[in-house]
Amino acid sequence: MMNGMSSKPARMGAAVFAAAVLASVPGVGCAGSGHHAATAADRALSARANEALAQAGLNADRVEARAYRGVVTLLGEAEPGDIRDAQRIVVSVPGVVRVNNLVLSGGPSTSSGFARAKRAPIVARAETAQ
């Protein structure tokens, strides 16, 4: 019985010691909170970009904005004019560092004059002035 009683305080002492050591090491346990903050910021920026697109009248079922660390990627399918408008709109949203435009278009290529294959991606990158 003496051994059972003495081992419980020993285990509690070890747990307290381990907690004290972990608390004294800077940065331990903070990695998750930094990731959480970045993920929340990405979600908020995505929401602001999608709201700006909706206010401009672009169909949310056709073009969607997704953010990661300030870089917004446009995804979906639209006409070439709508694609350019979407890029212009999202680049002006506060917090956007860059826009990667991966929206599919069935229209003709504006740069070459040749017909683009149906549903071919338009890949463009726009930098902000920030």
Image: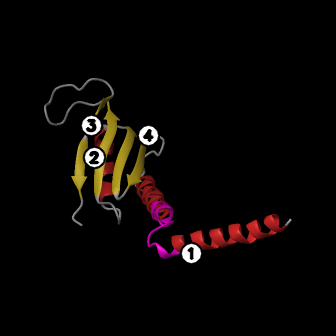
Q: Tell me what residue is drawn at x 56 percent, y 75 percent.
A: 20
The kind of residue tagged 2 is Arg
The kind of residue tagged 1 is Ala
Give the number of the mark in front: 3 or 2: 3
Q: Tell me what residue is drawn at x 41 percent, y 56 percent.
A: 49
| Region of the chain picked out in magenta, as a range | 23-35
Residue denoted by label 3:
122
Q: What separation in Å lies between label 3 and label 4 (alpha carbons)?
A: 14 Å
Residue denoted by label 4:
62
Residue 66 drawn at (x, y percent): 41, 50
The kind of residue tagged 4 is Arg
Residue 68 drawn at (x, y percent): 38, 54
Residue 109 drawn at (x, y percent): 20, 32
Q: Tell me what residue is drawn at x 30 percent, y 57 percent.
A: 91
Residue denoted by label 1:
20
Give the number of the mark in front: 1 or 3: 1
Q: Residue 82 bears which disc, if any?
A: none
Residue denoted by label 2:
84
In the picture, measured across the screen, residue 25 lies left or right of residue 98, that is right
The kind of residue tagged 3 is Ile
Residue 62 drawn at (x, y percent): 43, 40
Q: Earlier in the sequence, mark 3 or mark 2?
A: 2
Q: Is residue 117 magenta?
A: no
